[in-house]
Image: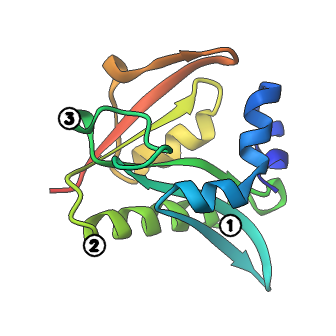
Amino acid sequence: MTLAAYDAVGRVSDEYREVLADVAARRRGATAVLVAELDGEVVGSVTYATSDNEYFDYDPAQGDCGFRMLAVAPEAWGGGAGAALIDACVARARADGCWRMTIQSMEYMTRAHEMYLRRGFRRAAALDASWPSGCAYAFVLDLS
């Protein structure tokens, strides 16, 4: 499901495809892997991470939690699964006492960017990164 969602919007390097597909490794290395279900079928997932684990990409001074690999099955786009997964990550971050959520999204994932902005994130261009498949835009959400 994650690979199908990513393939529907852009290009993913072979190395990152392996990371996206290995949900078991993410469950061991991240704070949590959350899923969205519709009629008993998984239609979305996201990896929530705090700054003390391998799935958080930033210096703790730039934020102390984030999420990665947000994916919704293309046939479920527009149904609210992505927003619900983001909201679940934000709720978990607040419960964990986090002060700022920092995330990245590839430049071509414009649909996701719109969703992040609607949920209160703001662009943080100073934290953008360059990857083999393109530029990753950074977004932050102050939780205090």
Residue located farthest toward the left when viewing the structure as drawn: 144
From this view, report whether residue 133 is shown above or below residue 14: above
Percent from the top left, x then y, of residue 83? 53, 61
Answer with the quarter of the image where residue 138 lies. Answer: top left
Which quarter shows the N terminus? bottom right
Percent from the top left, x then y, of residue 105? 54, 34
Q: Are marks 2 and 1 in contact (CB under 8 Å)?
A: no
- Residue 12 seen anywhere in this rendered image of the structure: no
Percent from the top left, x then y, of residue 101? 32, 48
Front position in the image: 18 or 41: 18
Front position in the image: 10 or 15: 15
| Element type at mark 3 | helix
Q: Earlier in the sequence, mark 2 or mark 1?
A: 1
**Could you give the CA–CA distance between mark 2 and mark 3, rounded to whole angstroms?**
19 Å
Locate residue 81 relative to residue 102 in the image: left or right. right
Locate residue 53 relative to residue 24 in the image: left or right. left
Answer with the quarter of the image where residue 102 lies. Answer: top left
Q: Amino acid at mark 2?
A: Ala
From this view, report whether residue 104 is shown above or below residue 79: above
Count numbered badges in the picture.
3
**Could you give the CA–CA distance between mark 1 and mark 3, rounded to whole angstroms?**
35 Å
| Element type at mark 1 | loop
Report the residue marked by disc 1: 79
Q: Amino acid at mark 1?
A: Gly
Residue at horizontal 77%, vertical 63%?
76
From this view, report whether residue 67 is shown above or below residue 43: above
